Image (cartoon, rainbow, N blue to C red):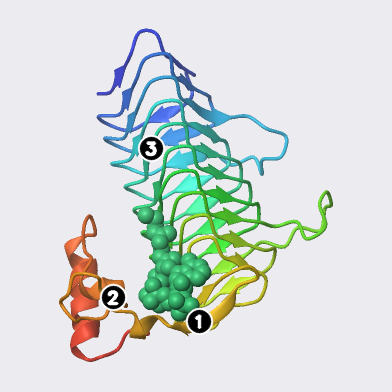
Amino acid sequence: MFSIHPTSFVAPNAKLGTGVEIGPFTIVHSNVVIGARTKIGAYCEIGVPTPLSNGSSLEIGEDSLIRSHSVFYESSYFGSGLTTGHRATVRENTTAGKGFQIGTLSEIQGSCQVGDYVRFQSNVFVGGKTRIEDFVWILPYAVLTNDPTPPSNDLMGCVIKDYAVISAMAVILPGVEVGLRALVAAHACVSKDVPEHMVVAGVPARVIGDTRKIMKRDASGKPAYPWTTHFHRGYPTEIIEMWQASANCSDYET
Ligand SMILES: CC(C)(COP(=O)(O)OP(=O)(O)OC[C@H]1O[C@@H](n2cnc3c(N)ncnc32)[C@H](O)[C@@H]1OP(=O)(O)O)[C@@H](O)C(=O)NCCC(=O)NCCS
C-alpha cells in the first residue's frame, strides 16, 4: 500500500495515502496527512510539532515530491503536486494551492498564503504573513520581508498579486504590494507598491517601464510579457488552454 524505508520513522497515527514512499532516515510525525503517490526523500522531517501551530494537521496533497533534507512543520496545507528541491523549510500555519514548487534552500515562514501554480527557484526567503496569489514566479535569492522595525512584533506581510515576477536578489520591504503581472527587476529594493504591469528596478526601486514593452531576447520581435503566451513548461493542459483562450481575445487580466 505504501513504501517506508526501514531506517525512517513514521508515527503510527500519521495518515499515508496509497502509494506513498518515505525515504531513508526521514521522520514523519503524528499530526500529518500525506496524499496518495507522494514521495518524500531522505533525511526529511515532516510535521514538526510546535506550540505556534493552530493544532491542525500538516497536509501534503497527492502526487507531491519532497526532496531530501526538507523540513515541514505541522498545521500547514499544500494542494496536490507540491514539489520541492533539497533542504526546503516551511513553517506552521501556511497554506498553498495546487502545483506549488519550492526551490532548494528556500524558507517560508509561518502564516503565509500561497495561491495555485506558484514557483520559487532556489534560496527564496518568504517572511511570515506574506500573501502570494496565483502563477507568481519568485527567482533566486529574493527576500520578502515582513518586519518594518526589526526586531518587533508588528509584522506586515507583503502581497504579491497574480502573475507577478520577482527577479533574482530583489528585496520587497514589509507590507508592499506588487501588482498584477508586475515585474521586479534583479536586485531591486522595493519600498512602495508596484502598479499593475509595471517594471520596477533599482535601490530604491522606481518604475522604469511597462512589462508589455519588453521584447523577447530571441530575435523573434515578440513581447516577453505576458509570459503565458510562450512559456508553458510543466503547467497542466487546462491551464495552458485557459491562457491561449485569453490571448486570443487579448484579455490578460483574468
Ligand atoms: C528588468 C529586466 C527584465 C530588464 O528590462 P528591460 O526593460 O528589457 O531593460 P533593458 O535591458 O532594456 O535596460 C533598460 C535600462 O534599465 C537598466 N536596467 C535593466 N535591468 C536593471 C536592473 N535589474 N536594475 C537596474 N537597472 C536595470 C539598464 O541598465 C538600462 O539602463 P540605461 O537605459 O541607462 O542603459 C532585467 O534587467 C531583469 O531584471 N531581468 C531578470 C533577471 C533575473 O533575475 N532572472 C531570474 C533568475 S535566472
Q: Is residue 155 left or right of residue 225?
A: right
Amino acid found under the numbered disc labelled 2: Ala
Q: Residue at x 64, y 52 (%)?
A: 127
Amino acid found under the numbered disc labelled 1: Ile
Question: Element type at marker 3?
Answer: loop
Q: Within 10 angstroms of label 1, few (less than 14), some, or many (20 or more) residues?
A: few
Amino acid found under the numbered disc labelled 3: Gly
Q: Residue 170 at x, y = what percent?
A: 55, 59
User: How many marks are shown on the rendered structure?
Assistant: 3
Q: What whole-number distance in Å separates the C-alpha atoms at marks 2 and 1?
A: 16 Å
Can residue 254 be spotted in the picture? no
Q: Is the shortest distance between ligand 1 and the CB of mark 2 under 8 Å?
A: yes
Residue for badge 3? 85
Q: Is the shortest distance between ligand 1 and the CB of mark 1 under 8 Å?
A: yes
Using the image, tell me which numbered label, if any, was put on residue 125. none
Image quarter for ligand 1 equals bottom left
- Confirm or deny contact between disc 3 and disc 2 (CB under 8 A): no
Residue for badge 1? 208
Question: Element type at marker 1?
Answer: strand
Pick the front one: 120 or 190: 190
Q: Is residue 174 left or right of residue 43?
A: right
| N-terminal label among 3 and 2 | 3
Q: What whole-number distance in Å separates the C-alpha atoms at marks 3 and 1?
A: 33 Å
